[in-house]
Image (tube, rainbow, N blue to C red):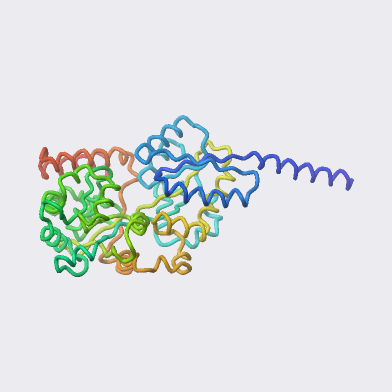
C-alpha cells in the first residue's frame, strides 16, 4: 500500500514538473519604447529565474499601433496570456468579453491592502469588477525650467492659469523662445484639464458634468476655458505644435524652447536622462479662476485574456511584477507613480524634489480635486478621436469654440451621461 501511495505521489510530482516545464506566457505591452521594453525584460528575467521552465514572451508593438494590435489579437483570440490595459482601453476590451474577471485573484492578494487611495476603484472602473491589476498611476502636474524662466526675471512656477498665460506670453518672441509646450495630437485631454479649471463645481465622478448634473459644455464657463486653451496655442506656442505628440513635447522642453509643460509622471524618466539634476522642477497644476483644478487619476495595469489557457501562471507573473522591489524599479526607471503605498516609505526617490508637484497636490485634495473620466461609457473609444478631430479644426480656425461646445454637448447627451 505504501509503495502504491509513493508511486502515485511521485507521478503527480513528475506530471506537475512536465506541465510547468513547457509553460510559455505570451505578454503584450501597449506603451512600448526601447527603454521601457528593457525594463520589463529585466523583470521577466527575474521571474524566469525564480520559475524554472517558465518562459515569458514579450510582444512590443510600436506605440502608435499598439492599441489596434491588442484589439485585433484579442478579437481573433490569438494566443495571449497577459495584456497591458490602459484606462482608456479597459471598457472596450470588457465590452468585447475579452478580459478575465480578476476578482478571485485580487481579493486574495496581500498586495491589494497596500494600494494607495483610488487604486481599488480604478481596478473596478467597469461594472464594479476588477478586470486588471493596476501597476502604475498617472496624474498630470506642471514641469518647468527655472534656468530659462530666470533669464526673464521670473522666479518659481505659475500658480494659476492666469499667471501661466501671462508668463508664457511675456517670454514668447515668436522666433526662438515660446512659453507653453502644447499638445496638438491624440490624446488631446489637456484641453479638459484647462477647460475644467474654470469651474468650481465639477462632479468628481464625471469630469464632463457639474455637481448639479449639468453637462459642462453647456455652461458659459466652458466657453471661457476653451478660448483660454486656444490662446495658449495661438499666443504662446510654436505653430508646428499643432502636430506635436509626447516626443515633440519632451524635445521642446529639453531644448528650452518651451519651458512650461503639463505632463504625466512618465516624463520624469526621460527628463532625468536628458537633463542634469535640478535643471527641471515640478509644481502643482495651476488653478483656474474658481481656485481649483481637476486632475484625473489615470492608471494602467495587467489583465488576463478570458480565453488564456495559462491564467494561474499569468496571475503569478502579474503578482511578481507588482512586488514592491519590482514595482519600485519599474516606476523609477519608466517614470510612473507606484500603486503600492509601501514603496513611498521604502524608496527615498519617490519623496525627492522631483515629485514636489504631486506631493503638494495630493496633500490638498480640496484645491486639486481628483476626478474621473466616463471611461466606462460604451462610446468612450469614439470620444477621444472625436475630440481630437474637433481640436484640430479649432486650432486651424475651421470651427468656432461655440460650435465645438455644441458638438461636445450633443455627443454626451446622446451617450446618456
Q: Is residue 375 above or below residue 294?
A: above
Is 291 placed left or right of 400 in the picture?
right
Residue 186 seen: yes
413 or 4, nearer to the observer: 4
Q: Residue furthest top?
A: 76
Check the picture and name the quadrant holding the C terminus.
Answer: top left
Residue 220 seen anywhere in this rendered image of the structure: no
Q: In the figure, residue 253 lies in which quadrant? A: bottom left
Looking at the image, residue 292 lies above or below residue 16: below
Q: Nearer the viewer, residue 285 or 157?
A: 157
Across and down, in percent, residue 350 comes to 40, 65
Who is closer to the viewer here, 372 or 285?
285
Quadrant housing the N terminus: top right
Left or right side of 11 for 397: left
Corner quadrant of residue 333: bottom left
Pick the front one: 363 or 95: 363
Residue 95 locus on image (x, y percent): 40, 38
Total numbered labels placed on residues in the image: 0
Image position of 294 (left or right of 395) = right
**Residue 132 image offset from top left, x and y in percent:** 46, 48
> Percent position (x, y) of residue 101?
50, 44
Amino acid at each position: 500500500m505504501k509503495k502504491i501511495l509513493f508511486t502515485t505521489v511521485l507521478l503527480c510530482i513528475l506530471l506537475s514538473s512536465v506541465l510547468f516545464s513547457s509553460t510559455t506566457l505570451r505578454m503584450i505591452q501597449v506603451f512600448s519604447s526601447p527603454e521601457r521594453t528593457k525594463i520589463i525584460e529585466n523583470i521577466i528575467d527575474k521571474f524566469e529565474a525564480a520559475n524554472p521552465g517558465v518562459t515569458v514572451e514579450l510582444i512590443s508593438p510600436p506605440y502608435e499601433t499598439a492599441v489596434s494590435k491588442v484589439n485585433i489579437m484579442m478579437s481573433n483570440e490569438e494566443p495571449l496570456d497577459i495584456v497591458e490595459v490602459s484606462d482608456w482601453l479597459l471598457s472596450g476590451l470588457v465590452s468585447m468579453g475579452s478580459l478575465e474577471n480578476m476578482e478571485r485573484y485580487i481579493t486574495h492578494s496581500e498586495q491589494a491592502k497596500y494600494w494607495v487611495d483610488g487604486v481599488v476603484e480604478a481596478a473596478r472602473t467597469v461594472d464594479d469588477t476588477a478586470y486588471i491589476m493596476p501597476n502604475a498611476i498617472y496624474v498630470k502636474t506642471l514641469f518647468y525650467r527655472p534656468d530659462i524662466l530666470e533669464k526673464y526675471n521670473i522666479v518659481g512656477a505659475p500658480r494659476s492659469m492666469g499667471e501661466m498665460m501671462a508668463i508664457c506670453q511675456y517670454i514668447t518672441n515668436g522666433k526662438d523662445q515660446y512659453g507653453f509646450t502644447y499638445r496638438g495630437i491624440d490624446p488631446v485631454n489637456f484641453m479638459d484639464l484647462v477647460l475644467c479649471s474654470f469651474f468650481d463645481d465639477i462632479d468628481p465622478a464625471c469630469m464632463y458634468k457639474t455637481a448639479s448634473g449639468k453637462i459642462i459644455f453647456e455652461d458659459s464657463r466652458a466657453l471661457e476655458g476653451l478660448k483660454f486653451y486656444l490662446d495658449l496655442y495661438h499666443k504662446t506656442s510654436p505653430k508646428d505644435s499643432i502636430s506635436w505628440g509626447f516626443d515633440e513635447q519632451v524635445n521642446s522642453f529639453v531644448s528650452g524652447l518651451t519651458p512650461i509643460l503639463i505632463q504625466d509622471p512618465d516624463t520624469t524618466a526621460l527628463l532625468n536622462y536628458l537633463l542634469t539634476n535640478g535643471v527641471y522642477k515640478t509644481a502643482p497644476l495651476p488653478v483656474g479662476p474658481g481656485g481649483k483644478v481637476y486632475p484625473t487619476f489615470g492608471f494602467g495595469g495587467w489583465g488576463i485574456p478570458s480565453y488564456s489557457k495559462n491564467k494561474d501562471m499569468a496571475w503569478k507573473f502579474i503578482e511578481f511584477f507588482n512586488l514592491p522591489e519590482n514595482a519600485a524599479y519599474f516606476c523609477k526607471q519608466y517614470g510612473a507613480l507606484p500603486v503600492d503605498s509601501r514603496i513611498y516609505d521604502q524608496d527615498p526617490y519617490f519623496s525627492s524634489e522631483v515629485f514636489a508637484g504631486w506631493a503638494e497636490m495630493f496633500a490638498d485634495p480640496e484645491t486639486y480635486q481628483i476626478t474621473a473620466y466616463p471611461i466606462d461609457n460604451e462610446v468612450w473609444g469614439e470620444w477621444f478621436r472625436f475630440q481630437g478631430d474637433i481640436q484640430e479644426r479649432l486650432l486651424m480656425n475651421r470651427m468656432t469654440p461655440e460650435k465645438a461646445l455644441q458638438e461636445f454637448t450633443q455627443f454626451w447627451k446622446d451617450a446618456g451621461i
